[in-house]
Image: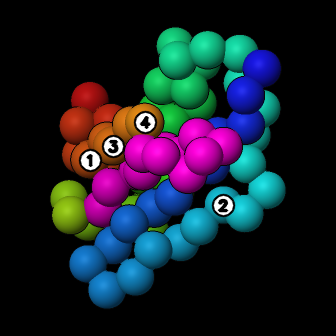
Amino acid sequence: MYRYFFHIRRVDREDSDHRGVVLPNDAAVLDHALCIIKDLRQGGEHNDPGLMMIVRNESLKTVLSLPFLAGYA
């Protein structure tokens, strides 16, 4: 199991997850990121198509980048 950090990047700033989430594999990381994006978009406050979900591993290497608009599809 590995710890992953989920960040929302905006044009003017980045909101960071400092605790991280422990997940077993890449498929679980993708599913978790898509669920976060879907929940945030349904709340109505994260509808900017310029938003990106950036996922980093324990080494802080970027392992996944998803645009919010595509993540909601």
Q: CA distance from mark 1 to mark 2?
A: 17 Å
Residue 63's quadrant in the figure? top left
Indicate the amino acid at tag 4: Val
Q: Nearer the viewer, residue 61 or 45?
A: 61
Residue located beneath label 4 in the image: 63
| Residue 71 seen in render | yes
Badge 1 is on which residue?
67
Q: Which residue is tagged 3?
A: 65
**Residue shown at 66%/43% (left/top)?**
58
Residue type, label 2:
Asp
Q: Position of residue 55 (x, y in %)?
A: 49, 45
Distance from disc 4 to disc 3, alpha carbons, whole Å, reads: 7 Å
Figure check: 72 above or below 10: above
On the question of residue 31 being in view, the answer is no
Question: What secondary structure is marked by label 1?
Answer: strand
Question: Mark 1 near mark 3, Cβ–Cβ under 8 Å?
Answer: yes
| Residue 67 x %, y % | 26, 47
